[in-house]
Each structure stands twice: as structure tokens, then as C-alpha cells.
Image (spheres, grey):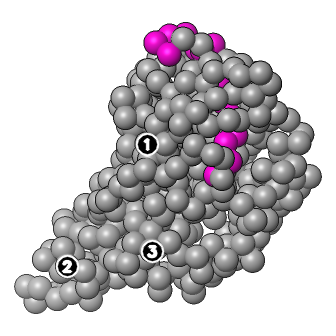
Amino acid sequence: MDFNLSPEMAALQASVRRLAQDKVKPRAREIDESQQYPQDLFEVFRDAGLLGLCIPEEYGGSGAGILGLTIAIEEVAKYSNSAALMLLLTRLPTGPVLIAGSEAQKDHYVRGVADGAMRAGFGLSEPGAGSDVAGMRTKAVADGDDWLISGTKCWMSGVVQADWYTVFAKTGPADSRQHDSISCFIVERDSPGLSVGHIDQKMGVKGVDTGELLLDSVRVPARNLIGEIGGFRLAMLGLNAMRPIVAARGIGLAEGALMYAVEYVKQREAFGTTIANMQGIQWKIAELATQIEAARLLTYRSAVMADAGQYTKEFVPYLSMAKYYATEVAVKTAGEALQMLGAAGYMKEHPTELWYRDARQLTIVEGTSQIQLGLIAKGVLGHDLWWD
């Protein structure tokens, strides 16, 4: 059992670390305050080949897999979770296509994301169906060889920037909760009847727009159906494989926040010494550092599992543990880092308040902490996770 990164992954880590320090770190505060999409960073990521990290070489990517993307996102998230989200969106919408799409779909849509010619969004959540996926009301009705899709998707990251969307809709009765009533489609941005609705005003992770996608009898050709009719399982497989990628946003944020706080307390003088010399602060630093490393081990393991295709039901507890623990550690570390700075941490002169706001998103998106706990418990109760 080797816990060291391969030479290729270590080189990737070092390369993205330098890029994040040189290009992402100086832009983090400006992105948050302007709330403008950082096209310059998109181009930096494109030119560095980071948009195709998790995409196989035959579709224009580098084949670094989910582990490679996880490592890259961890480095970027030390400074900006908005920039990290841009990288995450190279896998979330393409996941269902990579898992069950046709060769033509992969060659056009996935390749387009890998080379930066296209951006994509993921349409699953609805106003009345967030964690309750089976409760979605968006409807797809067969019309000759096409489908007509009507409904509203919400909380979609990158909704304004996307050129195409992975959209889940009911192909069975709208009120059906059967898993085979949901299917998955590729919907292009310029389709008649498709529009972007309300843009959310977010607490954090600004710069990458989140909002509504409105579909009014949008005609989608049959060739844009991903896999077969009945795609609930496809949604779950796609999300399962994403757990380490979301977790990476958490551990990166936690690392960035703790490193900043440590450098601050080593300089901040109080009561005749530096804060770093106080045992209470030292214990807190040690506790957070240990939790970050535990989260990293869970995350890297889950990334390796996902790359091995181990994202089906029996592996869910391990994947959910990574997402749950890493994002909760991010929230805790961001809060403690802010507290270490005291009043200064609450002010915009320091990035701690930005990390604090950004961290709260991570325990909600792509399966809340409570959803993850439920999945972990279900796995233990069903002996998917067991110790004898």
C-alpha cells in the first residue's frame, strides 16, 4: 500500500500549485467583489490543459482521471472556490455522458469541454425537488423522433456560461416516483424555448453564476438522450463519482484558511508573546491539521475508487464519507481560522471572511451533509461497509 502520489500526479500537483499561487490567488478577492465570471482564469486553465484532466485521451483529455482533477481542485481551492468550481464543471455535466453516452455524444460534447470550446451545466435540482430527486416535475414527452421538455431547473452552477446542459426529466408520469420514470438528455443552449431565468444572489462562491434554467417545450432530438430511458440510476452514479471532487474543494479551502491563520498567529503579539506560543492556539492548530489530513486520505481513496469504476451502490459509503467529512472540516476550519484572527478575521482586509462564506456552500451542494450521513448509515446497515 503506497500513500505517495505517482511521479505524474506529483508533477501535476506541483504545476497546479504554482499556477494557483501565480494566477488564482491574486484574483480571488476581485472575483468575489465584482461577481464577474473570471474568463481570464478559464483561459489559463484551458491553456494549461486542466479542463480535460478527468477526460480520457480518446476524447481530447489528458486521462489524469478523477484523482488528477481532485488534486488540481485542491490546489486551486486554497485561494478561490469559485475558480475551483470552474474545474469541477468539467466533470459534473460530462459525467453522465462519460458513463452512458454514445460515442458521438462523447466525441462532440465531452471533447468540446476538454479543449475549452464548450462549457456545460448540470440540471437536476428543481424548486420543489432538491435532495428529493424523484420529486422532480420537469417533463419530457415523445414527439415523433424527438422529445419536448418543459420545466424549471434551479441552483445550476455555470448556467449563464454553459453551451449545453445535462438535463434530467420525467419520461414517465410527472407525478411518478419510480426510478425508471426519469431520463437524461443533452440540451443545447441555443435551443428554441430554452432560457436562463433568475440568477441567484449568493452568500459566497461568486463569479460563476448560479440560477434557473427554464425549458418551454424545448425540442431535443432522440440522439441527445443519454443512455436509455430511465436514468435515475445514471444521476446517482454521476453524483457518486463526484464526491471526491467536491471533497477536494473542502480540503483545499481548509488548507488555505489554516495556513493563513498560522502565519498570522506567528506574527500577532499579545500578552507579551505571540499568539502562536499559546497552548490553546497550538492545540487548535494541531486538531485542524489532523482533521485536514484525515479528510485528504478519505478523499484521495475515494478518487482512486471512482477512477476504478467503484461508484456503484456498494461503494457509496466510502465516497459519501469523503464528501461529508471534507466539507464539514472546511466549515470548521474556516470558522476557527477567522476566530484566530479575532476582529481582523471579520474584515475584508483578510481572506478569512471569504473562506468562511464560501465553505458553507460545500456542505449543501451535490448532496447535503445530511444526505451523505443517510447514505453512509444505509451502507453500514446493509453491510456494504462492514468490518468482519
> Residue 5 at what x, y percent from top left?
72, 59
Residue 295 seen in the figure:
no
Disc assigned to residue 93: none
- Residue at 89% from the left image edge and 40% from the top image edge: 103
In contact (CB < 8 Å): disc 2 and disc 3 = no
Dot 3: what SS?
loop
- Residue at 82% from the left image edge and 42% from the top image edge: 105
- Read off the residue under disc 3: 36
In terms of image quadrants, where is residue 182? top right
Give the residues drawn in magenta, as a range. 174-189
- Read off the residue under disc 1: 154
Q: Relative to 325, does residue 78 appear above or below in the rendering?
A: below
In which quadrant of the rendered image does the N terminus lie?
top right
Q: Amino acid at mark 1?
A: Cys
Q: Is 177 colored magenta in this rendering?
A: yes
Q: Nearer the viewer, residue 376 or 101?
A: 101
In contact (CB < 8 Å): disc 1 and disc 3 = no
- Asked whether, in this view, residue 271 is left or right of residue 263, the answer is left
In which quadrant of the rendered image does the C terminus lie?
top right
Q: Nearer the viewer, mark 2 or mark 3?
A: 3
> Residue 318 at what x, y percent from top left?
56, 33
Q: Amino acid at mark 2?
A: Met
Q: Earlier in the sequence, mark 2 or mark 3?
A: 3
Q: CA distance from mark 1 to mark 3?
A: 20 Å
Q: CA distance from mark 2 to mark 3?
A: 22 Å
- Residue at 49% from the left image edge and 52% from the top image edge: 196
Disc assigned to residue 347: 2
